[in-house]
Image (cartoon, rainbow, N blue to C red):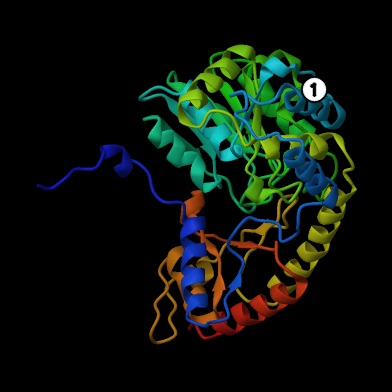
Amino acid sequence: MSQQLSSLLERFSEPETLKMAKLGRELRAKGIDVIDLSLGEPDFDTPQHIKDAAIKAINDNWSHYTPVSGFLDLREAVCFKLKRDNNLDYKPENIVVSTGAKQSLANAILALVDEGEEVIIPTPYWVTYSELVKIARGKVVEIRSTVENKFKITPQELEAAITPKSKVFLFSSPCNPSGAVYSKDELKALADVFRKYPNIYILSDEIYEYINFVGAHESIAQFDDLKERIIIINGLSKGFAMTGWRLGYIAANTEVAKACEKLQGQFTSGTNSITQKAAVTALTGDLRPSHEMTEEFTRRREKTLALVKDVPGLKCFEPEGAFYIFPDVSYYYGKSDGTNHITNSADLSMYLLNTAHVSSVMGDAFGEPNCVRFSFANSMTNIERAWSRIKEALAKLK
């Protein structure tokens, strides 16, 4: 008897970021030297004082089930961080801790979006945004941005995308994959539009907050009259090099927070106890390791941009945050090396993987079909080696 899997699985796609990383691992298993510029993961180890806190938590026997929304001391630590870094006032009941920011996003979208309701997402966007909306049976409404406009949308473009079915606006700043960072004035201009539409929630993904090359981070939640319908998404993966620890959180009004807690109670319950105790130290302790990582990313950014300028045909915006470049590669569409024919960004990414042995992520996954994402969360030596290979491979396309 044949068995039928749920139609839910047909609604969304596997993340291209994970798919490309998997292909890279398969080539490495065959003995091929693949340089990974695909995954969004700092190549640093977790700072020692955070690891020490985890070891202490193990020795102190923090080994039992945790509250669904997180330990009180951790939710207080999140509130402390939001006040210290962002001048935002929240209480522990506004915070829900999850197994990574991805789960925080999933909780929020499933709590807010009903079938047929629209979620407005500027392009380019993180690959999971659109797929979570599809899982919730919502409708993705894209606002296309451009390299020329530094991959940011205007208030006029936002207002043009709003309809009676608009329920959520979802964006990130700093942005994965473009590196765009919204200034306070730019956020204020968007906030002026949202004031006209009180039924729209704003999901603000701020996971790359500390990796900012242009100044202090600005959160849209700073506008007090909008704060009740803003859900901040954040976590420890990027700023603290804690990707494998799996901890994210939301800050939201109590109604949304309770809804997310209810959902999470049926999916995963509470987040790992040891991670939570380490996270208290991360959020309230010494931030110098985080700042030092950003300083190194700044150096790698400058090196990457210098190397990209030597590659003909790439149109590149200088990222203001995060650790990616997202060049327009459409110059190479229609070209061939005699065997491989490039018609889109997926072709180009696969060509670079199989020919240059450098992994990247095609722009289609981020809603921008003319671009490819390259990470600079790798060593300076590997960045130089990778871009030498990329330049050589692209030169073969005529």
**In this view of the protein, can residue 251 be seen by the observer?**
yes
The amino acid at mark 1 is Leu
Q: How many marks?
A: 1
Quarter residue 125 falls in: top right
The residue lying at 42 percent from left, 73 percent from top is 342
Q: Which residue is mark 1?
A: 88
Q: Is residue 81 above or below residue 213?
A: above
Q: Does residue 101 appear left or right of residue 59 in this picture?
A: left
Find residue 340 and report its horizontal and vertical position in percent: 40, 80
Q: Which residue is outermost to the left?
A: 1
Q: Is residue 134 above or below residue 329?
A: above
The residue closer to the viewer here, 308 or 202, is 202
**In this view of the protein, can residue 197 be seen by the observer?**
no
The residue lying at 84 percent from left, 32 percent from top is 85
Q: Does residue 159 appear left or right of residue 220 in this picture?
A: left
Find residue 196 and report its horizontal and vertical position in percent: 60, 15
Mark 1 burial class by Cα count in 10 Å: few <14, some 14-19, many 20+: some
Q: Does residue 250 appear left or right of residue 293 in this picture?
A: left
Find residue 84 and report its horizontal and vertical position in percent: 87, 29
Find residue 16 and report its horizontal and vertical position in percent: 47, 56
The residue lying at 57 percent from left, 76 percent from top is 34
The residue closer to the viewer here, 127 or 396, is 127
Secondary structure of residue under mark 1: loop
The residue closer to the viewer here, 251 or 336, is 251
Q: Is residue 84 above or below residue 389?
A: above
Q: Is residue 68 above or below residue 310?
A: above
